[in-house]
Image (tube, grey):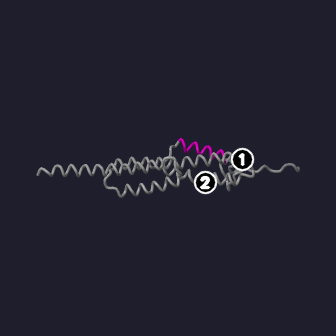
Amino acid sequence: MFGLGKATSEKDAQREREIEQQKTTVRKFLEQMVDTTPEDAERISERMKAFCQEDKLLDFTYKNKAMKRMRELECEANMRVADQLIREATRLTGKEQMRERGQKLADSRRFFSKVCSLGADSEWKKAYQRLADTVMMSGGVQREGYSRAKPLNTAPATPNRAKM
């Protein structure tokens, strides 16, 4: 009877050590995501999601906080690259650089869509959209159809009255 209390406290201590080890693993995942590329951040987040789904020791609130921070870090990685690409596109203004500029703009928009799906700040989204519109309206980027920069002309044509 006297040994039962000691065994349970030893089991509790072992469980606490295992929980702390799991928390350390989650922290390592999050540390790896700081200042990384979007591809690496996505890969690490997938590994972390799988780890958290298989884990039975960590409590639900800790997992939610870790997953929220993971989404923020993945979003930041995509924001950095999208911002870098859109700024490079604004620097390319020569006629001979239009194809490269269009490619950078397209790549930047791909990362921007990922940022939107991860839930970025609305202020950053607005700033990005303004900069992307500026790049599009500054010329050189070919776009099919009508846009805000070149809307459809719905005014009636003026008759030719030169020959009367």
Question: Residue drawn at (25%, 49%), measured in percent from left and top?
Answer: 13
The picture quadrant where one finds residue 103 is bottom right
Question: Residue drawn at (56%, 46%), measured in percent from left and top?
Answer: 80
Residue picked out by circle 1? 93
Instruction: First in sequence, mark 1 or 2: give its number.
Output: 1
Question: Residue drawn at (59%, 52%), measured in percent from left and top?
Answer: 109
**Disc number placed over residue 73 in the picture, else none:** none
Magenta span: chief secondary structure: helix
Three-letter residue code for mark 2? Asp
- Relative placement, left or right, of 39 versus 94 is left
- Relative placement, left or right, of 1 versus 133 is left
Tell me if residue 129 is in the magenta stretch: yes
Place of residue 131 in the rendered image (x, y in percent of width and height, measured from the top left): 62, 44
Mark 1 nearby-residue class (10 Å; few <14, some 14–19, many ≥20): some
Place of residue 75 in the rendered image (x, y in percent of width and height, measured from the top left): 50, 48
Q: Nearer the viewer, residue 107 or 46?
A: 46
Q: Write the start and end of the magenta stretch as one range.
A: 123-135
Mark 1 secondary-structure assignment: loop
Place of residue 46 in the rendered image (x, y in percent of width and height, measured from the top left): 45, 57
**Disc number placed over residue 107 in the picture, else none:** 2
Mark 2 secondary-structure assignment: helix
